[in-house]
Image (cartoon, rainbow, N blue to C red):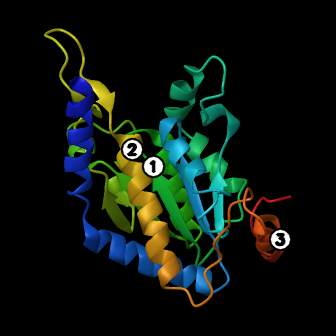
């Protein structure tokens, strides 16, 4: 079954994750959280799903502040506007202006292709404010395409985490003349980032991990974290 072929590809790509980059990223994020800071996360369109996946969820860290501009999320209509805005010069810079990103903060920017202005400009603007920028991007993909901005995301970030995958993202050949099917970036990216957050949690003396709101005592546990981070994360 092609279903199995897809799962095999995902399994293979997960094995290619560079653990040294995860180790380095975990150290920087943990140090920032231990210092009372939060991790800012930005991604556009489907990369934005990965940013959302880290936010306010059972087993996740409370110290996550995603930047989720409505025009770049997949509930935008028409959805094709997300592509136009992602390519709009100046938009990524403007997004940073509406955040509290500052010196000493850590910012994770997610872009599979790493070629569009929104992600690149967001990274550059965050660095200009003194933040350290981590990038999650597919090196195979980004090296196969020309940047639509002044540079690729991988070229402006302080630390790059490679998102294993093929140029174009999809993994399974269906038939001649038909584009490959089965994008892998969401499956690999989500597993990679959740694993990274687990690694961060293990490096903190008192990790701010959310419990499930659907287990007894979960709301009480989470209310303490929400109160602790209310002035640093958009929980209210």
Secondary structure found at label 3:
helix
Q: Position of residue 145 (x, y in %)?
A: 25, 35
- How many neighbours does mark 3 have within 10 angstroms: few (below 14), some (14-19), or many (20 or more)? few
- Label 2: which residue? 187
Depth check, mark 1 against mark 2: the one in front is 2
Taking depth in this image into account, of 225 and 154 the one nearest to the observer is 225
Disc number for residue 120:
1
Q: Residue at x 27, y 38 (%)?
A: 7
Taking depth in this image into account, of 86 and 175 the one nearest to the observer is 175
- Label 3: which residue? 220
Q: Are marks 3 and 2 in contact (CB under 8 Å)?
A: no
Q: Residue furthest left?
A: 176
Q: Residue at x 53, y 25 (%)?
A: 84
Q: Earlier in the sequence, mark 3 or mark 2?
A: 2
Q: Earlier in the sequence, mark 1 or mark 2?
A: 1
Residue 164 lies left or right of residue 231; in this view the side is left
């Amino acid at each position: 079954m092609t279903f199995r072929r897809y799962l095999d590809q995902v399994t293979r790509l997960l094995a290619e994750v560079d653990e040294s980059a995860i180790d380095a990223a975990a150290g920087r994020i943990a140090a920032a959280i231990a210092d009372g800071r939060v991790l800012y996360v930005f991604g556009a369109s489907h990369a934005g799903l990965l940013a959302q996946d880290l936010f306010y969820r059972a087993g996740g860290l409370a110290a996550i502040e995603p930047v989720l501009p409505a025009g770049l999320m997949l509930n935008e209509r028409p959805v094709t506007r997300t592509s136009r805005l992602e390519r709009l010069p100046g938009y990524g810079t403007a997004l940073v202006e509406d955040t509290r990103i500052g010196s000493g903060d850590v910012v994770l920017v997610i872009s599979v292709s790493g070629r569009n202005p929104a992600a690149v400009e967001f990274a550059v603007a965050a660095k200009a404010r003194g933040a350290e920028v981590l990038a999650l991007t597919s090196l195979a993909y980004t090296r196969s395409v020309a940047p639509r901005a002044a540079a690729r995301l991988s070229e402006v970030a302080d630390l790059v985490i490679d998102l294993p995958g093929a140029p174009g993202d999809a993994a399974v050949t269906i038939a001649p003349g038909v584009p490959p099917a089965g994008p892998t970036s969401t499956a690999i990216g989500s597993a990679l980032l959740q694993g990274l957050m687990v690694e961060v949690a293990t490096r903190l003396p008192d990790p701010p991990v959310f419990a499930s709101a659907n287990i007894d005592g979960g709301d009480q546990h989470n209310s303490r974290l929400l109160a602790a981070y209310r002035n640093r994360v958009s929980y209210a």
